[in-house]
Image: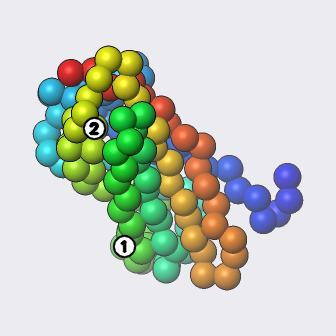
Amino acid sequence: MTAQQQVLPPPVLPDASNGVLYVDNLKDPVRGDVPPYANATVGDRVELTVKTSTNNQWRGSFVLTESSLEKPVIFGILKETFAKGLIAGASATLYYTITHAFSNPIVSPPLTVYLKP
């Protein structure tokens, strides 16, 4: 691993249980967290992306400030992202991208959850 490579933790869906997100039980918006990561810097852009197997997509971004360093970045994902067109066997994949001012974007490992009513 080179000095520029960084291993990020996957995003977190606090409402998911054992890899399953029960859509009917969700509040709107649905909380999605990006955990604190090493070498976070004021001005970093954190972008969370959600893609479902039913072709729904959501994206949100946040720019780190001094007060947000070393804290999770909390996003409010529209419940409709998970609920629209929900079918048996559906899933959602979440990942985030960190963009530092003077380096290439870094992409987190994905979090995949099954969607159930």
Q: Amino acid type of disc 2? A: Phe
State the SS at label 2. Answer: helix
Q: Quadrant of residue 74?
A: bottom left
Q: Which residue is depicted at the point 40% across and 29% down? A: 91
Image position of 40 with respect to 15: above or below:
below
The spot of residue 50 in percent (x, y) is: 40, 47
Q: Residue at x 31, y 55 (%)?
A: 75
Marks 1 and 2, the one that precedes in the sequence: 1
- In the image, is 116 to the left or to the right of 70? left
Quadrant of the image for the C terminus? top left
**Residue at (50, 48) in percent of width and height:** 95
Residue type, numbered disc 1: Ser
* Residue in front for this viewpoint, 52 or 20: 52
Location of mark 2 (residue): 82
The alpha-carbon separation of the residues under discs 1 and 2 comes to: 31 Å
Residue bearing mark 1: 67
Which residue lies at the image location 63% right of the left edge and 67% below the top edge? 105
Q: Dot 1 lies on which element?
A: helix
**Residue 107, position as x, y percentages in the image:** 61, 55
Residue 92 appears in which quarter of the rendering?
Answer: top left
Q: Would residue 33 be seen by someone viewing this image from the given angle?
A: no
